[in-house]
Amino acid sequence: MFNPFRVLSNNISKTDESNKIILFNTVGALLVKGGAIIISMFTLPAYLNYFDNQQILGLWFTILSVLSWILTFDLGIGNGLRNHLVPVLAQKDDLAAKKYISSAYIIIGVVVLLSILISTIVFRFINWNIVFNVPINIISKETLNLSVSIVFSGIMFQFLFKLITSILYAMQKSALNNLLSLLTSIITLVYVLSAKSADISTNLISLAVVNVLAVNIPLLLTTIIVFSKKLKNSKPSFYYFERKYAEEVMKLGGVFFWIQIMYMIITTTNEFLITSLSSPQMVVEYQIYNKLFTLIGVVFTLAITPIWSAVTKAFAEQKYNWIKKLYKILNKMALIAVLCEFIIIPFLQFVINIWLGDSAIQVNYFYAFIFAISGSIFIWNAVLSSIANGIGELKTQAIFFTIGAIIKIPISWILVEALNSWIGVVIANIIAMSIYCVIQPIWLKKSFENREIGVADNV
């Protein structure tokens, strides 16, 4: 029987140090973030008990989804820093690393400061009950405004602290990033399980505060530890900000930023569109299907998380043949993952009954089939983006994610009206992503054919 992880191990763990790093981070990611996924699966039923009103739970999911969009507005600084740091750290150039890191932190700091100033003015004129389609008799305007403000403040802190994750990726320590997600999931689950039941307003505001702490405390502690030990000579400083390094990070980051925005419009607007075109209550049903059918894709993405930075390093060393062979291995792994998406469909009702209880939902197998396709697209995109991002070839993503973003919302509206169901949003998502997933493999094939095999290749 084909074992993708054994293939990965046999092909990339037997040569140089970078290959061993990939294998270590892959195993670490699966173990650590795998635990986080398991915990998150327990968190949903805990949420259902925490909020006795599914409309409020749907509102909470939507608040997190909408405000999390803000995290993409880092101008691509994180990804730009990541790609520039890889060769610098490999060369052990502490001074250059310090300048890149300092410049990136200062840019992000300015963005955060401006965002806070603007939000204090703009938020006063926003009626969040209208935005989230929630009547005032369900949740008061004051409670919703306060909850949104708390979550937004937390995201602003995360905006700054999250830069450490890009640095860890550049250091090829992606397993540590997954540990942060695990800690966040544990803190959230412990609170939701142990919190005493209160009124809706208290529950919503309390959860908003806990969310801020659960996300940011692990990031802050990691930042302190990394710059106190491993990167002690490269910790950020105002005195090491240089325009040249800032421009280099922002130039590459600008392309990543555009791609992030377009990808965000395609993939993270589902909850908002379902809330707007249907109702917040339907978001809960969407989340149940989505949790199960993205599980395989998330595990798969975890396994290939180290690939991006490893490919960047290999590309700089002209190991083109290594990249090409790795791409073939990833395709085989993706095929197995896609098959698993469809294998779980017949067992879905049984799984949901065990997970959430017999009265949770009655499985609609048409919906399940659509989500299996959506999960497959997610898996395929992960392979393509890891290679394309690693070699710094972003044009195809920029073009076709833009096209997908443009058509996503109108197609969602048309399909929801035609099908009289929120599943139209998921189908629109599939259509929007499929364009890129068809074109990018063609481009990669031509790119591999045009590259000469580097003398440094070693697979």
Image (cartoon, helix red, strand yellow):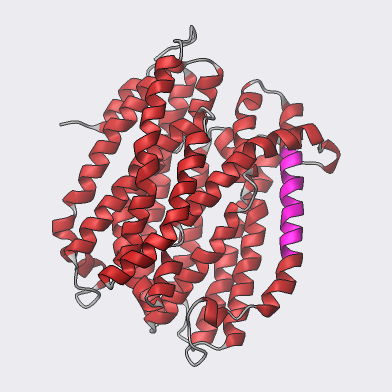
**207 within the magenta span:** no
- Please state the extent of the stretch shown in magenta in the rendering: 101-116
Question: Which picture quadrant has residue 12?
Answer: top left
Which residue sits at x=46%, y=62%? 269
- Quarter containing the N terminus: top left
Along the line of sight, which residue is nearer the eye, 306 or 452?
452
Question: Which picture quadrant has residue 322?
Answer: top left
- Quarter containing the C terminus: top left
Rendered view: 412 above or below 29: below
Residue 456: horizontal and vertical position, in percent? 49, 9
Residue 349: horizontal and vertical position, in percent? 17, 65
Rendered view: 206 above or below 212: below
> How many numbered tags mark residues here?
0
Rendered view: 240 above or below 15: below
Residue 436: horizontal and vertical position, in percent? 40, 41
Query: Residue furthest toward the top?
Result: 455
Question: Which picture quadrant has residue 428?
Answer: bottom left
Which residue sits at x=70%, y=69%? 119
Q: Can the viewer see residue 218?
A: no
Rendered view: 357 above or below 426: below
Which residue sits at x=35%, y=20%? 325
**104 within the magenta span:** yes
- 111 lies left or right of 352: right
Q: Can the viewer see residue 395?
A: yes
Along the line of sight, which residue is nearer the eye, 453 or 416?
416
Along the line of sight, which residue is nearer the eye, 350 or 104?
104
Residue 86: horizontal and vertical position, in percent? 60, 28
